[in-house]
Amino acid sequence: MTRRPEGARVRQEWEPEDLIEVWALLEEDQERLRNKSGANRLGFALLLKFFEVEARFPEDAGEIPVPAVSYVAQQVKVAAEEWAAYDWSGRAIKRHRMEIRGAFGFRECTEEDQAQLAKWLAVELCGVELNRDRLAEAVVARCRKGRLEPPTPGRIARLVGSAVSTFEERFCAATVGRLSAATRSRLDDLIAEDAGADAESAGGGGTFFTELKADPGALGLDSLLAEVNKPQRVRALELPPELFADVSEKLVAAWRARAAKEYPSDMRAAAGPVRYTLLAALCYVRQTEITDSLVELFIQLVQKINTRSSSGSAARRASCCGWRRLPWRSRAARSAR
């Protein structure tokens, strides 16, 4: 069976040599057309060749390239205009689909198959692939490998959504299971309303949540001291070192980015497992990011101090040299006179 790269769409413009290579009807194809005529004959031939390329049926008549319709129509000796008369909802197309699936050793994807695909996604892929379009492509590829006719794009989208939801539920449950009650309480302090938050708590109220998400301000001693305080407060949360040891960095980074977009009120409204996972991911990643920014801030501050020191020394030397030359120039001027 001829197949294109995963995720590629059927192109609508074809060169003559490509049409011959892909859409030419072989002897065995012609054999299957013997008892068919008119629109059914043309429709069956087009579905047959499309399935050979795509391992699926077209969603509608418009997905079949116009040059392919003309080329196949010539081969089956049916007017190309008959393609518009092909019935997409009648009994004939159902028989055609069944016959074509059988010809290539495929079968329909059942509800049970779809449930297994969603389970496979949740266990194997959702933790490492976060792009839903690529997850959908993986479903189509797995169906082809298992000789299953893929579900419709709409069903695949729902299948992917279900798998992602299942994975996230398990991921959040596993994360919360590694957090002590004390750590969860401190994470809640991060987003507590300032009026009711203990200023001495590790969280320090919603204000520290906002500070934690922010990058350091303008270079200076104040910004350096402010950043120094952040890792200490994050460490006070007592997140387990192995909290995200068994998941991909890409996944943790995605949850950190998601948390950075939220307001404290949004976090308070989220379900407990989701809230704790978002906050834990943010703090876990920010601790490393803040340490890196501290090093960068310190280097920049030292460079700034050295630059000022060098400039000051040069100015003092110039001033000193100028004071020494003035008397000499004065004597030289008097001698000349």
Image (spheres, rainbow, N blue to C red):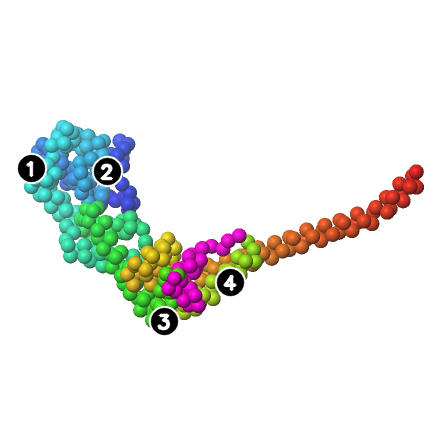
Report the residue at 81% width, 49% height from top.
Answer: 323
| Amino acid type assigned to the residue bearing label 2 in the image | Val
| Amino acid type assigned to the residue bearing label 1 in the image | Asn
Identify the disc placed on residue 22. Answer: 2
**In the shown orientation, is residue 213 left or right of residue 224?**
left
In terms of sequence position, does the residue under pointer 3 or pointer 2 come before the other?
A: 2
Quadrant of the frame with the N terminus = top left
**Real-space Cα distance between discs 4 and 1?**
82 Å
Residues at discs 4 and 3 in contact (Cβ within 8 Å): no
Quadrant of the frame with the C terminus = top right
Residue denoted by label 3: 182
The residue nearer to you, when weighing 113 against 207, is: 207
Q: Is residue 189 magenta?
A: no
Q: Secondary structure at mark 3?
A: helix
**In the shown orientation, is residue 78 left or right of residue 238?**
left
From which residue to which does the magenta span run? 195-218
| Amino acid type assigned to the residue bearing label 4 in the image | Val
Report the residue at 29% width, 50% height from top.
Answer: 132
**Real-space Cα distance between discs 3 and 1?**
76 Å
Identify the disc placed on residue 228. Answer: 4
